[in-house]
Amino acid sequence: MSNELKAYTLQELYAHPMEPICWLVEGLLAPGLYFLGGSPKVGKSWLALQLCLAVCRGKSFLGFRTRKSEVLYLALEDGPRRLHARALHLTEEAPAGLHLCGHAPLIGQGLEQQLDQMLDEHPGIRLVIIDTLQKVRAVAGANASYGNDYQDAAALKELADRCNVCMLVMLLYLTPEGEDPSDCDNWDVLTYRDIAATLSELQNTMDLAPDVLLVIGNYIDVIRRDIVEDEKLIEVCNKIYAKHKRALDLIFEHRNDGRTQLADGIKATLTTLTEEGVICASPFTSSNTNFFVFRTNEMNHYLPPIDAPTSSWGNEYIYSYWIAIRENQLCGVFEIGGWNVPEDGLTIPEP
């Protein structure tokens, strides 16, 4: 082993031009290792799933162009039921090339070998998402040191570089004591009223682009329309759920409430109208029992599907009719989500 440093001059570096970066998400993600960190319940997993769908389809993500590729998503905190429900909120059709996995060994205990095998069997995979890092670490929490962090990151980066893939690792922020902040005793909670007030202040005090203002306004409307603001009740329910989580999850999965008959009636009606060609209804699945989406051929004439960019829901449609069962009441809504549709796409054709 040589004791000399392998140094080179800047002139020598200039003499060997670098290869252009092969972006997976233009200007944002390329082959290599990336970390995305955040507090619990801020939407990291939703963002990861949206990224998966965008890359599999070659559609834009947060306004950035993507290179169509296969994706491996290690959703280690979500089971098939939860992933299924979330995906239905984002898309009505499953794209090809999105590989899902709910269980994986730890770093240094088989994870690298299994990823190597998966990438070898599916060479089209160019994006790997691990959600979250804590689920694949052998040493975590207060016992983890900087050395452990560096060692784990080095192992993942070596794999990403060797296989020439983009590896995005979701990271849950820990408390200064190394504890999981998802425990409500370890972090401060903002009420939905606080969030709505903060966003309203941003609307009034910052010079934001019109599309950003529209997104913020829609989110505030959702908070005020759909979310219970009884913080005391939420606090009590959270404490009950923390103590009886496994039992309540089991009850929830096998519940038989009074909505079943109503949901079945809606399904039957929409299915009949679809068969008659009156409407185009989304597929009905076991986890889609309180939310039904459909479109009409007549409205498709006035608001036709678009090719690019994608609509606000991540698909080609810019409008939807939907029926929801909320608090044992039916809600019918016509919704347009096309604020990112090109200006010439907003022209309504003559009937």
Image (tube, grey):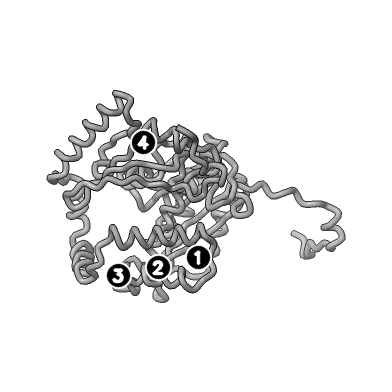
Residue 296 visible in the snapshot: yes
Using the image as rendered, state which of residue 127 and residue 123 is in the foreground.
127
Report the side of 335 relative to 327 (left or right): right
- Please, what is the three-letter code of the amino acid marked with disc 4? Arg
Q: Residue at x 32, y 47 (%)?
A: 82
Q: Nearer the viewer, mark 4 or mark 3?
A: 4
Q: Work out how far the residue at label 4 is from the one at label 3, CA to CA, in angstroms.
A: 42 Å
Front in this rendered view, residue 178 or 48: 48
SS under mark 3: loop
Residue position for label 3: 184
- In this rendering, the count of numbered labels is 4
Which one is earlier in the sequence, the residue at label 2 or at label 4? 2
Name the residue beneath numbered marker 1: 148
Residue under the point 60% across and 44% down: 163
What's the amino acid at mark 1? Asn
- In the drawing, what numbered circle is on residue 295? 4
Nearest to the observer: residue 27 or residue 322? 322
Mark 4 Cα-neighbour bin, 10 Å: few <14, some 14–19, many ≥20 = some
Report if the CB atoms under discs 2 and 4 are less than 8 Å apart: no
Q: Which residue is mark 2?
A: 141
**Labelled pair 4, 3 in contact (Cβ < 8 Å):** no
Q: Position of residue 72 (x, y in %)?
A: 48, 43
Q: Tell me which label, 3 or 1, sits earlier in the chain.
A: 1
Tell me how far mark 1 sits from mark 4, CA to CA: 52 Å
The C terminus sits in image quarter:
top left
- Mark 2 or mark 3: name the one nearer the start of the chain: 2
